[in-house]
Amino acid sequence: MPPELDQRDTDRDTLAGLDALDTPTVRRTSWWRRLSSSVLPPVVALVLIIVVWQIVWATAVLPEYQLPAPAAVWDSFLQIVADGSIWSILWTSISRAFLGFLIALVIATPLGLLVAKVPVVRSAIGPLLSGLQSLPSVAWVPAAVLWFGLTDATIYFVVLLGSVPSIANGLVAGIDQIPPILPRAGRVLGARGLAAARHVLLPAALPGYLAGCKQGWAFAWRSLMAAEIIAAGPALGLGLGAYLKQGSDFNDIAGVFSAVLLILVVGIGIELLVFRPLERRVLQARGLALT
């Protein structure tokens, strides 16, 4: 074989090997295997927790008013299901959380872009955003009550201060990790200003931005619960936080546990139904997750 043909074959094999390295690995698994690997472990963990809970309650290490039986908590949950109040309780809190989170996205996204791309803005408010992110949002509730009274404005104010810094900092971190060649390529192709932010910065920073949104939702949900617990009143309706406080006021430990479990279920549900699929899709698009 002539040397030039042998060299061409070698180069072709090398390029094919490099292309294979860039190709995302796709492994198809059966639906029952995916179901067992994703559903079975948490179900087993939940059953173990309930069993341990029942054993601790049966040994009477703690009195009944401090640790209720799992059956008592289940009865308390069934009570609000039977009278239909669970739907209004869930709707009050979830609607507030989603609306507050959407407002936070509208505020935090341009704010994050400014902090990431304008050095003066980063120097001025970058440390403030980090400080606000570490500040417990419950600290804002007393001031918000004095400013806005027992109104929805108090709730949304606390939710925004809890979620905006996390979303903005997540976007800043994502933009800081963008390879410099991408913005330069965008400028060469004519992407400047808002076009560069829309078509280059945000798509390239999407993993970090999504992580910030995920953390921002967690902070928004926590802030909402704190605000509903402290700023409870008839004008604000009965949300999950107010339902939790109601159980505490009436010394109803089963109701308290029922409220805590509902808050936990909503948080886990939003994670599994909203953020987990979005995160998986983003990672798969970049060849970073298996299907």
Image (cartoon, grey):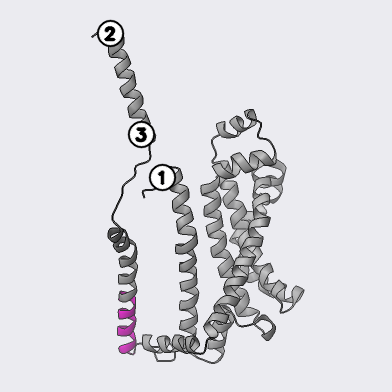
Question: Dot 2 surroundings within 10 Å: few (below 14), some, or many (20 or more)?
Answer: few
Q: Residue at x 64, y 52 (%)?
A: 109
Q: Indicate which disc, 1 or 3, sits on the residue closer to the N terminus.
A: 3
Query: Horizontal and vertical percent for residue 164?
Result: 64, 59
- Asked if residue 115 shows in the view, the reply is yes
Q: Secondary structure at mark 3?
A: helix
Quarter location, residue 116: top right
Disc nearer the start of the sequence (3/2) = 2
- Distance from disc 1 to disc 3, alpha carbons, whole Å, reads 12 Å
Spot occupied by residue 220 in the image (x, y as percentages of width and height): 59, 66
What's the magenta region? 48-60
Q: Is residue 121 above or below residue 146?
A: above
The kind of secondary structure element at disc 1 is loop
Say what amino acid the circle numbered 2 marks. Answer: Pro
Q: Measured from the top left, where is residue 197 in percent x and y?
A: 64, 42
According to the image, label 2 marks what residue?
A: 3
Amino acid under disc 1: Leu
Secondary structure character of the magenta stretch overall:
helix
| The image quarter in which residue 153 lies | bottom right
Quarter placement of the N terminus: top left
Q: For the residue labelled by badge 2, is the local secondary structure a helix, a strand or a loop?
A: helix
- Residue extending farthest to the top is 2
CB atoms at circles 1 and 3 under 8 Å apart?
no
Position of residue 29 relative to residue 239, above or below, is above
Q: Nearer the viewer, residue 65 or 148?
A: 148
Task: Name the residue tied to disc 3.
Answer: 21
In screen coordinates, is 47 left or right of 119?
A: left
Q: Nearer the viewer, residue 134 or 196?
A: 196
Q: Is residue 23 magenta?
A: no
